[in-house]
Image: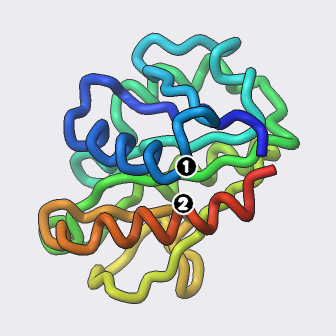
Amino acid sequence: MKDIGIFYSFRSVKTGQQVKKISKQLGADQIKLMDIDVATKADFLQFTNYILAVPTWFDGELPNYWDEFLPSIEKEDLKGKNIAIFGGGDQKGYPENFVDGIGLMASILEAKNATIVGFTSTEGYTFEQSRAQRGNQLVGLALDIENQAALIDERIKNWVESLKKEFK
């Protein structure tokens, strides 16, 4: 398995806590933590395997830092890039757009020929709709810290085990 870039906002405390858990499961020698707030196109393109932290903001939006970064890679072909996405959401407070950010990011990257990996089951979640949902799966790992904090560690462990098989 080649190096893995984990891109997230270093300013996000809750996301940073989850990144630490994911990093520990992966093994520190195989990952490089990248601050999306200052990352460049060159920083992003150096990897084959990616984990992107994409929490859902407001009523189903991408965080500002992703909105600001994405134009830098808009003309890039991401064929051969394996990208796993995780993010926080609140299925009770925002059941009509639960973890939409994950789905938005997956769609953007798939249009650039990236391969999205790390799909997870919708089982155990209760929401009305999500842009991250495809059939009975989500296009990434949904973490509901507000309502299901006790399930997060096990979900991360299982997700990382699946990524180890999907990353090349």
- Residue 19, x across and y down, in percent: 38, 42
Given the image, on which type of amino acid does mark 1 rest?
Answer: Leu
The circle drawn on residue 138 is none
> Is residue 123 positioned above or below 77 on the image?
below
> Is residue 98 positioned above or below 62 on the image?
below
Which quarter of the picture shows residue 143? bottom left
- Residue 26, x across and y down, in percent: 55, 49
Given the image, on which type of amino acid does mark 2 rest?
Answer: Val
Disc 1 crowd rating (10 Å Cα; few below 14, some 14-19, many 20+) is some
Is 34 placed left or right of 167 in the picture? left
Q: Mark 2 points at which residue?
A: 160
- Residue 65, x across and y down, in percent: 39, 25
Is 152 placed left or right of 70 in the picture? left
Distance of mark 1 from mark 2, alpha carbons?
7 Å
Q: In percent of the image, x 60 and y 52: which residue is there?
A: 84
Disc 2 crowd rating (10 Å Cα; few below 14, some 14-19, many 20+) is many
> Is residue 114 positioned above or below 166 on the image?
above
- Residue 119, x across and y down, in percent: 59, 69
Is 1 placed left or right of 63 in the picture? right
**Between residues 165 and 124, which one lies in front from this camera angle?**
165
Is 122 placed left or right of 118 in the picture? left
> Is residue 119 positioned above or below 116 on the image?
below
Q: Earlier in the sequence, mark 1 or mark 2?
A: 1
Are the residues flagged by discs 1 and 2 in contact, CB closer than 8 Å?
yes
Q: In percent of the image, x 25 and y 32: which residue is there?
A: 12
The circle drawn on residue 26 is 1
Disc 1 is placed on an element classified as: helix
Q: In percent of the image, x 56 and y 27: which residue is there?
A: 32
How many labels were placed on the picture?
2
- Of badges 1 and 2, nearer the viewer stands 1
